[in-house]
Image: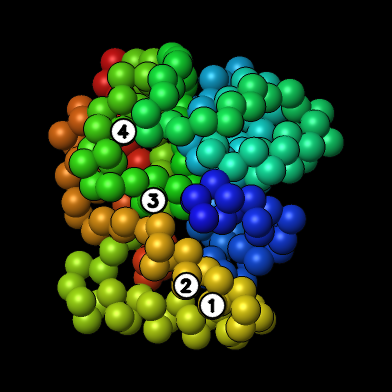
């Protein structure tokens, strides 16, 4: 099964399951949107990498009603759901089914955002992507990555995993959903440590690079392109 088909298989229940599978999901996504420090009426050009069902894009659209949105993802059924949700909100968006790891990003953009997607790339591909994102941004543009990170030591990675499972069960996630999520993690995740990713962002040319929010393996990273 490809990664696209794996996520399309859960597309109709993806949003519902996220609330239990991502600890403090509201704080996680809000921290990402808050990093877009632009006027609320700005006609931002925004690219969402691995947009899925548009969970993050919808929050961006709510915060910036004039935003011009581009969504790219490998999974067409996930993107179909995103498109419907955005249309219901009165937003038109450019929807691209494709691999942002290899295809042109386009641009320039004022913001490039991503949530729980880039960790599927191999590390060398992450480093290259960060450079490509920096090149696709307009001067002063912002990159925000709401991401899943690897524990800096085996002991901490095990603690992250135990904490995540405990949270998911407490939040009411079904055992089948937890098992399916763990299977996807094992097969498709290529997580990197927070320090490595911050370092790659700096090496790509981003300034003001930092982690703004973190809970176990979930972290919000951002950087800005210089003017």
Residue placed under numbered mark 1 in the picture: 179
Counting from the top left corner in percent of width and height, residue 163 is at 42, 81
Q: Could you tell me how far apart the alpha carbons at marks 4 and 3 are, in whole angstroms?
A: 12 Å
Is there any visible trace of residue 138 in the rendered image?
A: yes
Q: Residue furthest front?
A: 1
What is the quadrant of residue 199 in the picture? top left
**Most foreground residue, 172 or 24:** 172
Q: Earlier in the sequence, mark 3 or mark 2?
A: 3
- Residue 174: x, y in percent? 66, 80
Can you say whether 63 is above or below 104 in the image?
A: below
Residue corresponding to mark 3: 120
Choose mark 4 or mark 3, whichever is in front: 3
Q: CA distance from mark 3 to mark 1?
A: 18 Å
Q: Earlier in the sequence, mark 4 or mark 3?
A: 3
Q: Residues within 10 Å of mark 1 (few under 14, many from 20)?
A: few
Above or below, comparing residue 40 to residue 5 in the picture: above
Say what secondary structure mark 1 lies in.
helix
Q: Earlier in the sequence, mark 4 or mark 2?
A: 4
Q: Position of residue 4 (x, y in %)?
A: 54, 46
User: Looking at the rendered structure, which numbered label has been put on residue 182?
Assistant: 2
Mark 2 neighbour class, 10 Å CA radius: few under 14, some 14 to 19, many 20 or more: some
Left-right relation of 188 to 199:
right
Toward the viewer: 86 or 190?
Answer: 190
Q: How much space separates mark 3 and mark 2, taking CA atoms?
A: 14 Å
**Label 2 near label 4: C-beta < 8 Å?**
no
**Mark-to-mark CA distance, 1 and 4:** 30 Å
Query: Which one is earlier in the sequence, the residue at label 1 or at label 4?
Result: 4
């Amino acid at each position: 099964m490809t990664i696209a088909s794996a996520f399309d298989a859960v597309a109709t229940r993806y949003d519902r399951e996220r609330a239990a599978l991502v600890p403090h999901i509201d704080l996680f996504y809000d921290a990402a949107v808050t990093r877009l420090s632009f006027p609320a009426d700005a006609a931002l050009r925004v690219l969402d990498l691995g947009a899925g069902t548009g969970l993050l894009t919808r929050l961006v659209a709510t915060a910036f009603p004039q935003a011009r949105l581009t969504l790219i993802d490998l999974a067409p059924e996930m993107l179909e759901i995103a498109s419907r949700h955005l249309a219901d909100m009165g937003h038109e968006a450019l929807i691209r089914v494709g691999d942002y790891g290899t295809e042109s990003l386009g641009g320039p953009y004022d913001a490039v955002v991503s949530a729980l997607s880039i960790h599927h790339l191999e590390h060398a591909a992450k480093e290259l992507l960060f450079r490509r994102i920096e090149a696709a941004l307009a001067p002063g543009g912002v990159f925000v990555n709401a991401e899943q990170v690897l524990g800096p030591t085996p002991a901490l990675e095990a603690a992250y995993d135990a904490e995540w499972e405990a949270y998911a069960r407490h939040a009411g996630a079904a055992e089948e959903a937890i098992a399916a999520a763990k299977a996807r993690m094992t097969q498709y995740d290529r997580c990197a440590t927070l320090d490595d990713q911050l370092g790659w962002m700096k090496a790509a040319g981003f300034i003001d690079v930092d982690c703004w929010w973190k809970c176990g393996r979930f972290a919000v990273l951002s950087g800005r392109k210089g003017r």
